[in-house]
Image (cartoon, rainbow, N blue to C red):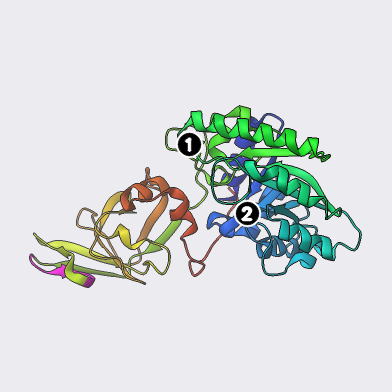
Amino acid sequence: MLDAIAHNLRVVKGVAQGCKVLAVVKADGYGHGIVPISLKLQTEGVDGFGVALAEEGLELRGAGIDRAILVLNGIHGGAHRDVIASGLTPVLYEISEAAAFHAVAGGRPIDVHLKVDTGMGRLGVPVANLAEFLTDLRSFPSIRIAGLMTHLSTADADPDFVAVQLASFAHADGLVRRYGHDPVVRHAANSAALFRHPEAHFDWVRPGIALYGYPGADSIDAPLRPAMRWRTELIRIRMLEPGESAGYGRTFRATRQMRLATIPLGYGDGLLRSASNRAEVLIGGRRCPVVGNVSMDLTTVDVSTVPDVALGDEVLLLGEQNGESLDARDLARATGTIPYEILTNVSRRVPRVYLNG
């Protein structure tokens, strides 16, 4: 697993062509475990980390991460002193947050990255309001714009709108500089933009899912390696007769005699309930369908095609087994979602084991 993370970072660096790499490790490292993943990335020479929340950044500092940590979603809940004391870099987009940091700065400069909204419509100063924001920012001289950023909403699908966003970003960059600021770094590229839009690389790139083995769009061909292998084992095997059902709601009824197995894993562990009667797992290198509704702790699968199946046999939800493989894209297609949700949904009650080699 950790070797896959290191490999994926090398792929990212090769594509980034000299840009610094800010590894996005929010949401518990996309479900992989924020601390072990970040320590591996730091060892492999990543330039910095992106987290969603101050709490995630503080956890990394406590674990020995000494690289730059950018708090992508801004600072909430009054953590401004802790952010400054821990050397985290806040993303700024509300003038009230500038006031809050200025109030605790004690006359010291506070480096921030200013986020502008060029079309994502979530966080960021709308470019149309940027001049007013920069005028108001003059009231808080402790705030120093060290970076300028935006987020691309269609890097995986619509290059024309990417061009619109980048043109808006260029306008914002010029306006920020006319107001006397000199951001030393600019960044916009997520994983999909890393591979598809070199014009968006600027000074930093911000790969997230690419580091975990997925390029950000199914149509992107990149030599990445999925880092997560998700396994469990069989805990019960029984025969199901024609007409008998499996699971809550009786959504599956056997039309023939079949061998049914139960695994100790359900939506409480992160297997989406929408996998019911739709997804597959690997047992003995064979694809076995999920039958019946996924419940909180248990799921049933059809093992009729697996010879010599036995209690304790490995069941694989993600990874390779006997020459066959399943990855988060397979499970996402079966459940009508995206690989991001599959990975980040794996709950903390699923034990993580970190392997090199």
- As displayed, is residue 193 above or below residue 55? above
Q: Residue at x 27, y 60 (%)?
A: 276
Tag nearer the camera, 1 or 2: 1
Q: Who is closer to the viewer here, 152 or 235? A: 152
Drawn side of residue 28 relative to residue 83, left or right:
left
Q: Mark 2: which secondary structure?
A: helix
Q: Earlier in the sequence, mark 1 or mark 2?
A: 2
Pointers 1 and 2 in contact (C-beta within 8 Å): no
Magenta segment boundaries in residue numbering:
242-248
Residue 279 rendering spot, x and y as whole percentages? 30, 54
The number of callouts visible is: 2
Identity of the residue drawn at 62% across and 34% down: 168
Q: Point out residue 268 in the picture as x, y percentages from the top left corner.
A: 41, 69
Q: Which residue is mark 1?
A: 156
Give the image location of residue 344, x and y in percent: 49, 57
- The amino acid type found where label 1 is placed reads Asp
Height in image: 345 above or below 211? below
Q: Amino acid at mark 2?
A: Ile
Q: Residue furthest right?
A: 107
Cα–Cα gap, marks 1 and 2? 25 Å
- Camera sees residue 46: no
The residue beneath circle 2 is: 37
Residue 27 falls in which quadrant of the image?
bottom right
SS class, disc 1? loop
Where residue 118 is drawn, which disc sits there? none
81 relative to 31 in the view: left or right: right
- 66 left or right of 55 in image: right
Number of other residues with Cα within 10 Å of mark 2, as a class: few under 14, some 14 to 19, many 20 or more = many
